[in-house]
Amino acid sequence: MWTLLKDRDVLVLTLSYLCMNYVFYLLSTFVFLYLVQERHFTLLEGGWLAAAPPLAAAVGAGVGGYGAGELGRRLGVRRGLRLIPLLSLPAAGVLQYLAVDAVNAYFAVAALALCYACVELNEGPYWAAIMHIGRADAMAASGVLNTGGNLGGVIGIPIVGYLAEHHAWTTAFLLGTLLAVASGAAWLLVDPERARAQGAAAEATTA
C-alpha cells in the first residue's frame, strides 16, 4: 500500500479523479436546486428537467467504457486511455461556463446534461488506467482512486452548498470549470504503461 501511495501515476490519477468528482457531485446533487433557485422553474418542471443530466450521464458512462477499450486496443494503452479525458474534461469545463452564462434556461439544462455526459465518459478510462498502473496490486490501487473520488464529494459538497445558500452559482460552476480542465490536464502526466515498462526493465536487469 505504501508503495502505491508513493507511486507518481497513482497519485496524479487520484488527484485528477478528485478534481473531476467535484463536477460529478455538483451535477448529481445540486442540479435540481439550481434549476429551481436560479433558473426559476417550478418544482414539478424542475424535477422533470433535472432528470436529463443523469440520463445523459448513463449514456456517457457506457460510451466511455466502450471507447476506452477500443482506443486502448487501437492506439495503445497510454495514448488510447488519455484521449477521452483530454477531450471530454475540458469540454465539461466549457459546458459548465455556457450553462451558467446562458440566457435561455432550457439551453442551460441541455448544457448541463452534455456536461454530465462528458464527465461520465471518463469512468472507463480512469478505472482501466488504474488497473494497468496497479497491475498485481490493482485492487489496492483502485481503492486509492476511489477514495480520491469520494474526497471530491467530501470537499465539494460543502463548498457548493455554501455557495448555493448565498446564490453564488456562477462561482460554483466556474470553480467546476477550472477543476475539470485541471483534471484533464493531469492526464498528460499519467502513463498507465510505466509500471509495466519498469517491471520489464527490472526483470531484464536481474536476468
Image (cartoon, grey):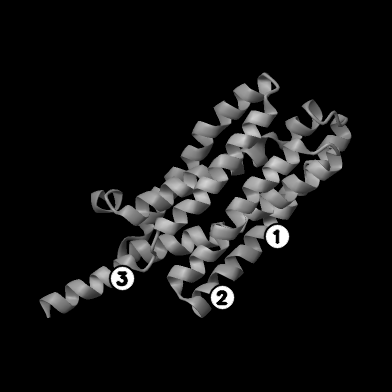
Q: Is residue 5 left or right of residue 28?
A: left
The image quarter containing residue 70 is bottom right
Calculate the distance from the C-alpha at mark 3 to the C-alpha at mark 1.
32 Å
Query: Which residue sits at x=75%, y=35%?
Result: 32
Of circles 1 and 2, which is in front? 2
Q: Is residue 41 above or below residue 75?
A: above
Could you say whether the residue bearing mark 3 is in a helix, strand or loop? helix
Q: Are marks 3 and 1 in contact (CB under 8 Å)?
A: no
Query: Which residue sits at x=75%, y=37%?
Result: 101
Q: Residue furthest top?
A: 166
Q: Is residue 165 left or right of residue 4?
A: right
The location of residue 77, given as percent across then percent down, is 44, 71
Calculate the distance from the C-alpha at mark 3 to the C-alpha at mark 2.
20 Å
Say which of 160 and 61 sits in front: 160
Q: Check disc 1 and report the residue beneath it.
A: 59
The image quarter containing residue 99 is top right
Query: Which residue sits at x=52%, y=53%?
Result: 184
Q: Check disc 2 and report the residue beneath it.
A: 70
Q: Check disc 3 and report the residue beneath it.
A: 196
Residue 137 at least partly seen? yes
Residue 140 at least partly seen? no
Instruction: Please rate how many residues cluster around mark 2, counting C-alpha atoms within 10 Å: few if below 14, some from 14 to 19, many from 20.
Output: some
Say which of 113 and 187 sits in front: 187
Instruction: Please rate how many residues cluster around mark 1, counting C-alpha atoms within 10 Å: few if below 14, some from 14 to 19, many from 20.
Output: some
Amino acid under disc 1: Val
Amino acid under disc 2: Glu
Query: Which residue sits at x=73%, y=43%?
Result: 98
